[in-house]
Image (cartoon, rainbow, N blue to C red):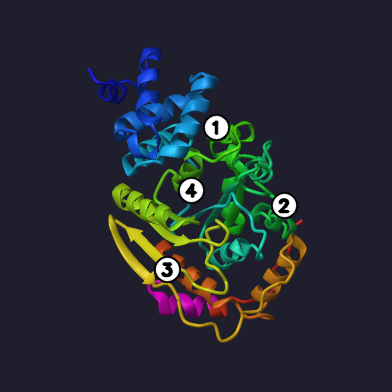
Amino acid sequence: MSLDRSLGMSAMIPAQDLPGLLSAVARGHTHATDLSREAAHALFAEWLSGHLPALVQGALWTAFRFKGESVDELLGFVSATEDSLTPLATPSAPRPVIFPSYNGARRHANLLPLLALLLARQGVPVLIHGTYGGTAADADLRLVDHDPSDRTTSGEILADLGFAPAASRHAVHDQLERHHLAYAPLEVLHPHLAAILSLRRQLGVRSSVHTVIKLFNPFAGPAVRCAAVTHPPYLERMRAFFVAAGATALVLRGTEGEPVAHPRRRPALIGIEGGYEREWFPEDRTPLTELPELPADHGAPKTCQFIEEVLAGQRPLPATLRDQAACLLVMSGAAADLATAYARIDQAQRPIRRRS
C-alpha cells in the first residue's frame, strides 16, 4: 500500500510512514511530491493533536516553507483544522464576516478596524482574529523574516477603542451579540493551531500554518471570509482554494498583509461563492490626482482618532474602503446590491462611543 493511501485511510500516521512522507515533501519546490487531500488532512490532524515529535514538526515546517502547498493540501489542512475545533455558534443573518489579522501595519495606518466597524454598524457580525491579547501576544511578529518594528495591530487599535480581546469563546459570542464585533486571539478559537503557530518563534520563518489561519472558518455555519495576500502568485492559489472548497470569500491583495484595501489605490476585489468567481472591482490603475486624507502617524492613538473622525463624518471615508465594505455587505446578505450598500454606508456616519 502506498504512503498516500495509508495516510488517507487512517486517522493516525504510523511512525514508520513519517520518513517516507518527509522524503516526499522535502525535495524543494521543483522535485517535491504533493500530498492528496486525504493525506494532507491526516497529516495536519496528527500535527494538531500534538502527537508529532518536535523534530518531525520542524522538518515539516521547513519542507512546506520551501515546497509551498498545493490546493489539495490546503483543502486537507483547513478541513483538519475545522474538524478539530469547537465551532462558534453562527449568528443569525446576515452571515458573519471573518478577518484574519496577523501582520499589523508599519508604513501606513492600519485601517482594518475602520472597515470592521463600518460593517458592524450595519448589523453584520464581524470576527477579527490574530495573536494580540493571547499568551503568545504578537509572537508571530517578532521574527527576523518579518520585522515587527513599529507595527500597529488590529487588536491594539480595537483595544484602544474599547473592544478588548475576547478571553473565551463565550466572550466572542457575547461581543458579537452586543456589538456585532469581536476580536479573538487565535488560542481562544483553536489552541492547538495557536501552539503550532508559536513554533515560528523557534524556527524563524513562516510556513503553511500562516496560510491556514487565513482560510479556516471557526463558525459552525457559513461565513464570508476576507483573505489577503502580499504576493500575486498566492492570490491565484487562494482563489483556487475557495473555489474548490465551495466557500464564500472576498480575496484581495492586502495592505501590508492585512485584509483591507489600500486607501490610496484599490486592488482587484474578487468575490467567490458557490464555486464561482466574480470580480466586484478591477484593480484601479488610474493616475492619482489627489491623495486621500490619512493619518501621518500610523500608531494606535492617531489611527483611533482618524477612525473616530471618519465614523463621525468629520473626515471622508477612503473610497477604496467604501468599495470593499459595500462588497462585503452584499456578500453577507446585509444589502441587496452595491447601490443599497453604498447608501447604507453613507447614512451610518455618527460618533463612536468608546467602551470601557
Q: Is residue 53 magenta?
A: no
Disc number lying in front (4 or 3): 3
> Which class describes the residues within 10 Å of circle 3: few (<14), some (14-19), or many (20+)?
some
Disc number lying in front (4 or 2): 2
Is residue 174 at least partly visible in the picture?
no
Tags 4 and 3 touching, CB below 8 Å? no
> Which class describes the residues within 10 Å of circle 2: few (<14), some (14-19), or many (20+)?
few
- State which quadrant residue 139 falls in: top right
Distance from Cα at disc 4 to Cα at disc 2: 23 Å
Residue with the mark numbered 3: 268
**In the rendered structure, which disc, 1 or 2, sits on the residue that comes first in sequence?**
2
- State which quadrant residue 73 falls in: top left
Secondary structure type for disc 2: loop
| Magenta part of the chain | 334-345
* Main secondary structure found in the magenta portion: helix
Q: Amino acid at mark 1?
A: Ile
